[in-house]
Image: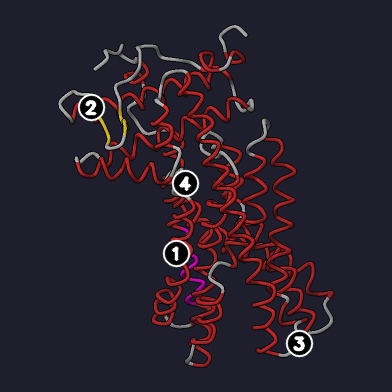
């Protein structure tokens, strides 16, 4: 194995948890406590703890489907689990409570006195108030990630993930309310369960992800975070309009229940398909960016061409993980793959000028140190020999002993320039 110089950043990394992790844990704890307020509200609205519990079980069905879809989207570059939990809990707890507070204490006293009939009140509550207030609060976790956690918020796919999780949490609580109310009033929640749990489990997620998630995600690829001042309101408007289009169907679609199902097939299903295609295209773009940036490191000697091919394709990663699983090294290989992906994203942020240059160099050095750590661990597991994959090399000894900086890869990032 080629000898390598010790990488000092590996020893200098802080041993304790990061500030972001601590803030995330505190946020989750606060939201967990606030969830008692949501439970109290649901109990009062439904009237029976048993029905609340039963409705909660029913609401797990659409929630589970959305979570499965989000995890599939997030597989290429997984977001921090704490951030994902925070987003989902924010939607289920904070977004619900803040929507209730804004509607009850601000909007209703200001607007309701000017409404002349029950129909106007229902139209306002369904088509205007609910879409705009709900989408506002569902989008807050995405805004928080955009403003304060820019090192992990890289682009539109990240925006979609955080927005969809927040929306999924909100829909979970709202579904409990709808299912429980239907059970309490008629003793039969099958139709509302079919409508919300089977036909449209992704509606809330699509509204928030297509608007706020994509808007802030694309803004994250720009140099300045001030773009968020424009992106958030624009995304909020798109999310609210999509939400209003869905909620208003009962007002303008003729034909009763049959007409609604026709509208669902003609309008909502194509919108869902378009959203899925958009996410797929964004994932393909993310994979291409990973390859481009890893090619940069390959030319600088950190990866072989075949390593880049393995790390930058889904099939290649599957082959790496299969090799590692046979040798009990799956966890180390998973860390190696994810570190390489973070390294590629870090370089992309540096090239577009996001953040401080010295911070970029320090972060890159730490990521390269982590990369070497995973390589050494896997090499040691095969008795100190260069690790070879079937059909080519997968994990090799580090090439050379330099801790290469961005300046080794792009003159624009050379010290002193």
Q: Please name which of the two marks, 3 or 4, marks the residue nearer to the observer.
A: 3
Is 174 part of what is drawn in magenta?
Answer: no
Instruction: Identify the secondary structure beneath mark 3.
Output: loop
**N-terminal-most mark, 2 or 1:** 1
The image quadrant of residue 401 is top left
Furthest-left residue in this view: 383
Q: Please name which of the two marks, 4 or 1, marks the residue nearer to the observer.
A: 4
* Residue hosting label 1: 36
Crowding around mark 3 (Cα neighbors within 10 Å: few <14, some 14 to 19, many 20+) is few
Marks 2 and 1: CB-CB under 8 Å?
Answer: no
Q: Position of residue 269 (x, y in %)?
A: 63, 71
Q: Position of residue 259 (x, y in %)?
A: 70, 86
Instruction: Tell me where the magenta segment starts and ends, as one range.
Output: 34-43
* Residue hosting label 2: 379
Q: Position of residue 215 (x, y in %)?
A: 67, 48
**N-terminal-most mark, 2 or 3:** 3
Q: Position of residue 335 (x, y in %)?
A: 34, 37
Instruction: Identify the secondary structure beneath mark 2.
Output: helix
* Residue hosting label 3: 254
Crowding around mark 1 (Cα neighbors within 10 Å: few <14, some 14 to 19, many 20+) is few
* Residue hosting label 4: 83
């Amino acid at each position: 194995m080629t000898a390598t110089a010790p990488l000092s950043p590996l020893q200098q990394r802080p041993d304790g948890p990061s500030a972001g992790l601590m803030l995330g844990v505190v946020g989750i704890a606060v939201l967990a406590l606030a969830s008692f307020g949501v439970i109290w509200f649901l109990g009062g609205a439904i009237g029976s703890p048993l029905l609340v519990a039963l409705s909660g079980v029913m609401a797990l069905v659409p929630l589970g489907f959305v979570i499965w879809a989000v995890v599939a989207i997030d597989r290429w570059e997984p977001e921090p689990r704490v951030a994902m939990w925070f987003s989902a809990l924010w939607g289920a707890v904070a977004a619900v409570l803040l929507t209730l507070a804004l509607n009850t204490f601000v909007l209703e006293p200001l607007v309701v006195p000017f409404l002349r009939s029950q129909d106007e009140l229902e139209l306002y509550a369904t088509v205007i108030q609910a879409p705009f207030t709900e989408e506002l609060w569902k989008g807050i976790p995405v805004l928080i990630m955009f403003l304060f956690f820019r090192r992990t918020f890289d682009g539109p796919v990240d925006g979609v993930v955080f927005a969809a999780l927040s929306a999924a949490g909100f829909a979970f609580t709202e579904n409990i309310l709808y299912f429980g109310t239907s059970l309490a009033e008629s003793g039969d929640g099958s139709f509302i369960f079919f409508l919300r749990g089977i036909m449209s489990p992704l509606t809330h997620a699509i509204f928030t992800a297509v608007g706020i998630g994509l808007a802030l995600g694309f803004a994250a690829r720009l140099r300045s975070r001030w773009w968020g001042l424009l992106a958030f309101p624009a995304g909020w408007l798109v999310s609210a309009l999509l939400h209003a289009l869905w909620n208003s169907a009962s007002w303008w679609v003729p034909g009763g229940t049959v007409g609604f199902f026709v509208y669902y097939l003609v309008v909502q299903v194509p919108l869902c398909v378009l959203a899925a295609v958009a996410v797929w295209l964004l994932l393909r773009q993310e994979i291409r960016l990973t390859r481009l940036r890893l090619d940069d490191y390959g030319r600088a000697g950190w990866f072989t061409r075949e390593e880049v091919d393995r790390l930058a394709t889904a099939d290649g990663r599957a082959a790496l993980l299969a090799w590692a699983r046979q040798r009990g090294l799956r966890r180390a290989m998973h860390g190696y793959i994810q570190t390489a992906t973070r390294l590629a994203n870090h370089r992309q942020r540096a090239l577009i000028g996001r953040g401080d240059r010295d911070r970029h160099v320090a972060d890159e050095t730490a990521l390269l140190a982590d990369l070497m750590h995973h390589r050494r661990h896997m090499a040691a597991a095969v008795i100190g020999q260069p690790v070879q994959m079937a059909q080519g090399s997968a994990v090799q000894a580090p090439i050379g002993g330099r801790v290469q900086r961005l300046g080794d890869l792009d003159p624009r990032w050379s010290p002193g320039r």
